[in-house]
Image: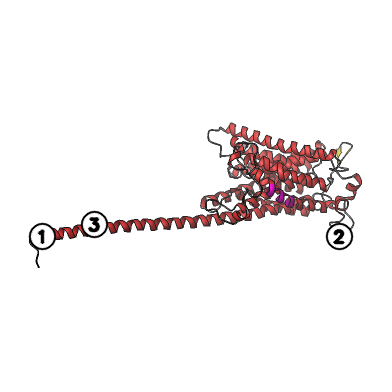
Amino acid sequence: MTLPQPLRGKSVLLATLIFTLAATAWTADFAFAQEEAEAASEAVAATAEQDISYTINSLVMFFCAVLVISMQAGFAMVEVGLNAAKNTVNILFKNIMDLSVGVLLFFFLGFGLMYPGADAAGKWFGFGGSGIMGWGDAALTEVDATAPYSPSADFIFQVAFAATAATIVSGAVAGRMKFSAYLAYSAVLTGLVYPISGMWKWGGGALAEWGFADFAGSVVVHAVGGFAGLAGAIVLGPRMGRFVNGRSIPSPGHNIAFAALGVFILWVGWYGFNPGSQLAYSDSVNANITCFIAVTTTLSAAAGSVAAMAFAWFLFRKPDVTMALNGALAGLVGITANCDQVTFLSAILIGAISGLLVVMGILLLDKLKIDDPVGAWPVHGLCGVWGGIATGIFGTAIPEGMTRAGYITVQVQATAVICVWAFVTMFILFSILKAAGCLRVSVADEQQGLDISEHGMRAYGSTPMMP
């Protein structure tokens, strides 16, 4: 049957309209489906990118934490080498206990004090709970898609810093402190003193609000340990025979090879300390900054060693290897606060000044009759202060709205606050232990050596105890 012409035209028009509507609907559905697929693909890509970033950041941070923990061996070797052989076991024992006691106390108390959370922002005290930020074991095995790295890696990294701060004091009080008194000190520093002052800067506390900068701890770690050690050395008094009739009697270490080995270990460990403090490493920008920090760290250490050697050579007419070794450590301490924000030439200058300061600091303690066998205060205390101030002088990351003079002022004030906190709290603790008769060994025990009197063993087998 053939439709009339008018009806035939209308049918074609209707069919065309239906087809057009169907095609439009299909195209819209296809476009929507395509958008959904692209969004899903982008989400998968973002998740994969986040997963890769989380993995790299966590594993590199863990590796850097291992480097920092290895510094315990460096501190032990430096202290052993620069002290009498008869105290070797005691020194090694103190170093292992700094790490062991420190880990446990930092887990249960210190980490929560140092990182109390947003509620403590701008404050002087807070507590985020025991353990790793109050998280349970199950939560720590799960991946938080919004986190930049594993909280477990963060804890290992932070506890390594706490142990470092405690170990610095060991050298300043070597050869005359009771082992039980040292354990009490180490517990208080790692569990309370260091975490609280650390919170003021790294936990978002009051000093962070001031605009205080200390990238990896010239002040927060090293000056705290250095000034705690100074308090211990003052309260303890010098070793027997160190100062006689107002004269300084040198007490050379028994193994300079150990001391040199320790400095080399510390220098290597510092690449976990400073570059590791970038905390993120997985993209080109962070990788570049991390390597930049490694260069400023290296330049400062080298300049510190050369400057200390040259200055001591000029003063004593002979090149002294122990001064050069301490100069390298001084340069490392001085650059630690500002390694992320100074130029290469500034890093060299900071290290060179650190090297001069450490020599002057050792001579100053000698004049004041303060016995610091390894130079803990000159290296970590004095050069830690210099690192904090140098950040204000040479740093390029001046907070917005702050002048250079204001930046220097903040650095000086905050550095003073932390140093006074460490010195006063530890001076009080050491004074209490002294008043209770628990601080210093007897004259006979000191003469015999702490290895035998405190631990009943020798470090070097059955051979006679060396002086």
Magenta segment includes 373: no
* Foreground residue among 278 and 289: 278
Instruction: Describe the element under mark 3 as helix, strand or loop.
Output: helix
Residue 191: where, in percent of width, then height?
Answer: 71, 45
Residue at x-position 56% and y-position 50%: 280
> Sequence-wise, which precedes: disc 3 or disc 1?
1
Mark 3 neighbour density, 10 Å: few (under 14) some (14–19) many (20 or more):
few
Return the residue found at the far left. 4
Instruction: Describe the element under mark 1 as helix, strand or loop.
Output: helix
**Disc 2 target residue:** 461
Mark 3 vs mark 2, CA separation in Å: 97 Å
**Disc 1 target residue:** 7
Tell me where the magenta segment starts and ends, as one range.
Answer: 99-108
Residue 351 is at least partly visible in this image: no
**Disc 3 target residue:** 21
The amino acid marked with disc number 3 is: Leu
Return the residue found at the far bottom. 1
Circles 2 and 1: CB atoms closer than 8 Å: no
The amino acid marked with disc number 1 is: Leu
The amino acid marked with disc number 2 is: Gly
Residue 397: where, in percent of width, then height?
Answer: 56, 39
Return the residue found at the far right. 444
Circles 3 and 1: CB atoms closer than 8 Å: no
Residue 125: where, in percent of width, then height?
Answer: 65, 38
Relative to 253, 345 lies left or right? left
> Sequence-wise, which precedes: disc 3 or disc 2?
3
Magenta segment includes 103: yes
